[in-house]
Amino acid sequence: MIVDAHLDIAWNAISAGRGFLGPPAPGYLVSRSSLITSGVGLIFATLYTAPARAGRAMRTRFVYENAHEAHIMAVAEVNYYRSSGLQLIGDKAELASYIKGWRKGQIAAVLLMEGADPIEDPSQLGAWTGMGVRIIGPAWGGTRYSGGTGAPGGLTALGVQLLKAMRRKHVILDLSHMAQEAVDDAFKLWRGPIMASHSNSRELVPGDRQITDATAAEVARRDGVIGISFYQKHLRTSGRATLDDVMKHLLHLARAAGGPERIGLGTDLDGGFDSREAPMNDLSGLKELSTRMRGPFSRQQVEGVMGNNWRDFLSRSLPE
């Protein structure tokens, strides 16, 4: 079972009409059928909402001006996943049962909120966990909770409250998109399960969107996992990305984290870009990536990167 820790399925469907249940939209890679054909059986499905200030970075009318609008949008995305018949995994027992009975052709999801602005106040967190949210990344750009991509800054006072509420509710913390100052704040404050759903190496591609070797090492020390993003601008500074670039980031972060056991996939292959900005033309590239990893890694390590590392992480991190 391949596991992909970052797909913006509901946002694509609602904001751009690229539905999940049909074949991939022309020029795009992700749909239920393409995931199943490639052997993906578990995804981290995002609740992503675009702030109006994102401007040209996200060319969509599906944007929010305030927290209440973000809340409404994220609830609509939860409803989209449920209407798609996507099984949502909420605890360790559900995960174990799904893995035990899994056959190719089945797909389930863990809900990941990317950017916490839809949570109007940390006191509302119980409503979101009740809807199935199990992972939260406080930032995308800057949010009311955290500095983020292109928006330097630490955790806000509201962000500190949110992390404390997440710990009480057994929610996993996702560092992807958090500004370095906020990452540092989180390391001081956070004592729960931690991960980076889709983050590549800052040493290879500079920029605040990537993670440092020190961050990778600390995530690993805390028994977390880092997902490799397949977005071209996360893979190289210029030119068309290939699977060679994916391998470079994978190998680099594996070394920084102490081994490939801390690395997984977080492709973001539907994150607002089409196949021209991906390192492959279709999801059959996942099989080719698996083959390429057999040189530096053992079979068990390859299976870990392709899915087992995320499965093991969820097995120890989801609520009872």
Image: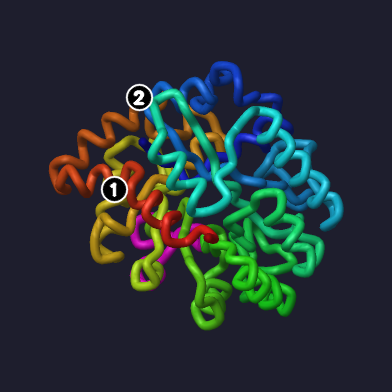
Q: In the image, which residues are magenta?
A: 202-218
Give residue 280's quadrant in the image.
Answer: top left
Give residue 271's quadrant in the image.
Answer: top right
**Does any portion of residue 4 appear in the rendered image?**
yes
Magenta stretch: includes residue 136: no
Q: Along the polypeptide, which appears first: circle 2 or circle 1?
A: 2
Give residue 89's quadrant in the image.
Answer: top right
Can you identify the residue that label 1 sits on? Answer: 304
Magenta stretch: includes residue 209: yes
Q: How busy is the neighbourhood of tag 2: few (under 14 within 10 Å), some, or many (20 plus)?
A: some
Determine the CA span between mark 2 and mark 1: 18 Å
Can you identify the residue that label 2 sits on? Answer: 284
Q: Where residue 34 appears, x then y in whole percent?
A: 47, 22
Looking at numbered disc 2 in the image, what kind of residue is underneath it? Answer: Ser
Q: Main secondary structure of the magenta part?
A: loop
Q: How busy is the neighbourhood of tag 1: few (under 14 within 10 Å), some, or many (20 plus)?
A: many
Residue ID at (34%, 32%): 286
Of tags 2 and 1, the one toward the viewer is: 1
Residue ID at (68%, 29%): 13
